[in-house]
Image: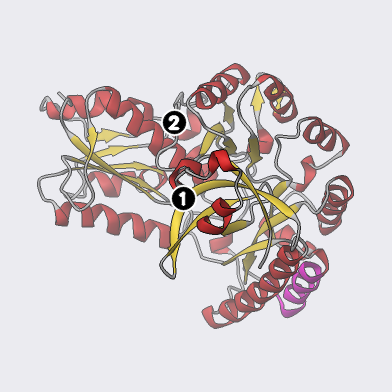
Amino acid sequence: MLNGKTVRIITLGCKVNKYESDAMLILLKECGCTEAPENEPADISIVNTCSVTNIADRKSRQMLHRMKKQNPGTTVVAVGCYVQAAGEQLLADEAVDIVIGNNRKKDIVRILSDHFDNKDVKDNLIDINHDNEFEQLCVSAPSGSTRAYIKIQDGCNLFCTYCIIPYVRGRIRSKSVEDVISEMNTLSQNGVKEIVLTGINICSYDDNGRKFFDLLRAMKDVQGVERIRLGSLEPRVINDEFISIIKADSRFCPHFHLSLQSVCDETLKRMNRHYTVEDIKKAVNLLRESFDRPALTADIIAGFVGETEADFNTTLDNLTELKLYETHVFKYSRRKGTVADKLPDHLTEKVKEARSDKLIRIGEVNKAAYERSFIGEPVNILVEEIIQKNGENYFRGHTERYMLIDVNCTDYLSKASPDLMDNKPEDYINNIITVTHSM
């Protein structure tokens, strides 16, 4: 029933959603669907939704309605986290034809086939909190990227006060070690040079007693992959054992994204985060003692509930001291259904905006200083695309430390060995080149 149908998938939210969208697209292509060309109507319009904030909810609703308004004849399919949070509302929404909750994306082909066979399959919701099965999805090749993601884990048991994710993603469940390694090998065989491990909380990985570190050790036997990048890490996993594992395999990138949210103990307590500022500083110091200028990045929430001026200044001072490479700053956004939404002392948008601006400025100073430290040194870039600047072609890609670098193609090729002089710039996409870093 699906052979010849055109499909468009819109992905909102996190890298886990991106992975799941890629996996659904592969399943649909295997049964005869094709991607709808840009700006052309699709027979099937899938929106992989996000529900991390009230704003994300609104964007998800708007996108679903936009799909139906732009193309009344399309079958609009709502999947993902917003579906799990607002399923009854979407079931009553005439703009949405099919509703698919989390842990049911693997059934996309059957559900759509039944729909086009005139069966009533609009409702595909489950009680995510009582489903302990890891949803088996697989990506054999990345969609429109040289970097591939593997979802190793789903769900969360931590229940941070600001977060809806445990309620819409359910409890922790993990892909088996064997399945992760198999997927890595498949991606490698299909030419992927860099793999990123992603999940809702990858540090909580647990395959029947085999933990996160066991999975990392098992990757030593994967051939062909040149870079392995880790998703968000909690300070608690940065210890001597972790360092030993990462240093034993040079393919692990010296880029560590720390899920901090705040660098003030009082704020961390209100967030129900399970570490202290001392834990953060220990982790940062250990990473810097163990690696040459590791790229340390972090998420920080500005203006959390009850954050006093003193609390904010503590975070400001600590971030100045830590000198992280990149700080991703988010203004606190209320999320209905969370503990934090019901707490007293919410800050005004004006205060949150001002605090966010200060954090961003510190982040910009730290980032510039970090990148300057590599000027004049050779850096390795995985070429991801060719862009144009002032009418000239440039290679664009990231280093192992996730610095984004642009390199003039003509300049690079003029210095290449004679046997490479006839190469075209596009021949270098998905290949690693070495250049001297300059700002």
Confirm whether residue 54 shows in the render: no
Residue picked out by circle 2: 141
Kindly identify the residue that appears in the image at 74 percent across and 67 percent down: 372
Q: Is residue 241 above or below residue 393?
A: above
Q: Quadrant of residue 184?
A: top right
Nearer to me, 113 or 102 = 113
State the separation of the CA atoms marked 2 and 1. Answer: 17 Å
Nearer to me, 407 or 103 = 407
Kindly identify the residue that appears in the image at 49 percent across and 59 percent down: 335
The quadrant of the picture occupied by the N terminus is top left
Q: Is residue 191 above or below residue 286?
A: above
Q: Which residues are magenta?
A: 307-320
**Callout 1 amino acid:** Glu
The quadrant of the picture occupied by the C terminus is bottom right
Q: Is residue 370 above or below residue 415?
A: below
Instruction: Classify mark 1: residues with Cα within 10 Å, few (<14), some (14-19) or many (20+).
Output: some
Give percent across and percent down for residue 108: 30, 29
User: Are dots 2 and 1 in contact, CB under 8 Å?
Assistant: no
Q: Quadrant of residue 35?
A: top left
Residue at disc 1, secondary structure: strand
Q: Is residue 298 above or below residue 169?
A: below
Kindly identify the residue that appears in the image at 67 percent across and 64 percent down: 438
Residue picked out by circle 1: 385
Q: Is residue 318 magenta?
A: yes
